[in-house]
């Protein structure tokens, strides 16, 4: 077990930023840590990395209790905070040498460690440049390199793709997936597609409490609501009122409405009952009415839907 949190609480004055949370993260997992602004994500990460002391509860990193062994724990963790801690007037190689020395990398190993990070993080073309000259994407790569320079077993990344353009996000996402093959990785982000693309597991925190914990697929199954189906038929192939009645007669269909109509087609918005899949029956019904089917698509419950459902209502534990 890489990270174990037991009844963790953190107060700022009388306000509980983190309220009695518990969870475990296994070795080699990539975990997406999600929540709205002010939910307690960064506070939790700072406690795991020993930058903050809990008000109560315990944190273990590779079986070491963080308060009693803070210096040893820091050696096992690589941390990239949301505000990337870079010295802009240093060039990349000098900065990584400085970071390696701070992390107590033996002098004889520093050059080897720097070369490895330059290769892994794709910094070869910019290694001799000053950090202040780099794009935001390369600055994030430098930040990741400093977080990993001492070969930590656990990586904590707080909003690593914040402010990046789509191409830079894809590059950092690939790097994170690569790192996740070797390390335990906790990733905080507001980009839900990033979590679905990179993470083995999702933790959602709201108002200081864990409200969901599971794989993206298991959460989609657990919080699945009514099914939404888009159906398009050729306009001249049948009367639209006849098609409406036919669709409404199909098992597990709740509501039907016309979404759009043009000279060539009619689009229907169909709501099915929770957990149902009426696509095959809809296909057969349209064919039986001699209508021409142009499109049939069922919308799945997205992680964004789940996030919104859990963080816009009163917090309650769902784990």
Image (cartoon, rainbow, N blue to C red):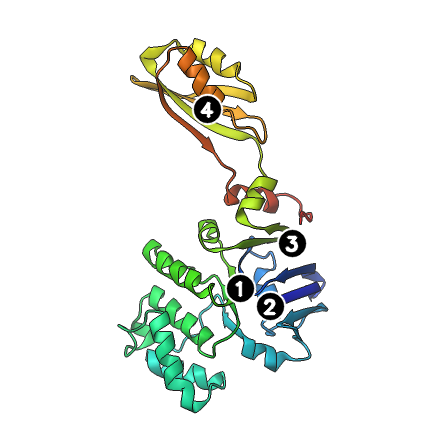
Lateral position of residue 132 relative to residue 192, left or right: left
Toward which corner of the image does residue 273 lie, by quadrant? Answer: top right
Measure how far apart labels 4 and 1 are at the Cα level.
42 Å
* Residue most extreme to the left: 125
Q: Which residue is mark 3?
A: 210
Q: Which residue is mark 2?
A: 2
Disc nearer the start of the sequence (2/3): 2
Front-lying residue, 202 or 138: 202
Disc nearer the start of the sequence (4/1): 1
Q: Which residue is mark 4?
A: 269
Q: Position of residue 181 (x, y in %)?
A: 46, 64
Measure how far apart labels 2 and 3 are at the Cα level.
19 Å
Measure how far apart labels 2 and 1 are at the Cα level.
8 Å
Disc nearer the start of the sequence (3/1): 1
Q: Looking at the image, which residue is at 34% across and 81% down?
A: 93
Measure how far apart labels 2 and 4 are at the Cα level.
46 Å
Q: Is residue 111 visible to us here?
A: yes
Q: Residues within 10 Å of mark 4 (few under 14, many from 20)?
A: some
Disc nearer the start of the sequence (2/1): 2
Q: Secondary structure at mark 3?
A: strand
Q: Which residue is mark 1?
A: 28
């Amino acid at each position: 077990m890489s990270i174990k949190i037991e009844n963790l609480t953190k107060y700022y004055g009388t306000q509980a930023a983190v309220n009695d949370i518990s969870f475990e993260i296994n070795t080699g997992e990539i975990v997406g840590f999600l929540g709205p602004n002010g939910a307690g994500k960064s506070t939790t990460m700072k406690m795991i990395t020993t930058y903050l002391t809990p008000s109560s509860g315990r944190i273990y990193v590779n079986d070491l209790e963080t308060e009693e062994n803070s210096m040893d724990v820091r050696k096992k963790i690589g941390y990239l905070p949301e505000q990337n801690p870079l010295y802009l007037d240093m060039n990349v190689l000098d900065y990584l040498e400085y970071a390696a020395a701070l992390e107590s990398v033996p002098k004889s190993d520093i050059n080897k460690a720097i070369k490895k990070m330059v290769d892994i993080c794709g910094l070869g073309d910019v290694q001799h440049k000053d950090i202040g000259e780099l794009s935001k994407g390369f600055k994030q790569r430098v930040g990741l390199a400093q977080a990993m320079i001492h070969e930590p077993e656990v990586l904590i990344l707080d909003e690593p793709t914040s402010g990046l353009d789509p191409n830079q996000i894809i590059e950092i996402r690939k790097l994170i997936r690569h790192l996740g093959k070797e390390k335990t990785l906790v990733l905080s982000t507001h980009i839900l597609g990033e979590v679905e693309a990179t993470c083995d597991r999702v933790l959602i925190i709201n108002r200081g409490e864990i409200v969901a914990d599971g794989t993206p697929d298991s959460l989609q199954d657990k919080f699945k609501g009514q099914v939404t189906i888009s159906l398009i038929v050729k306009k001249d192939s049948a009367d639209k009122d006849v098609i409406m009645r036919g669709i409404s007669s199909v098992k597990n269909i709740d509501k039907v409405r016309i979404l759009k109509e043009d000279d060539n087609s009619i689009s229907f918005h169909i709501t099915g009952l929770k957990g149902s899949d009426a696509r095959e029956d809809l296909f057969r019904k349209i064919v039986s009415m001699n209508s021409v089917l142009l499109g049939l698509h069922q919308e799945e419950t997205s992680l964004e839907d789940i996030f919104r459902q859990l963080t816009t209502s009163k917090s309650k534990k769902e784990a």
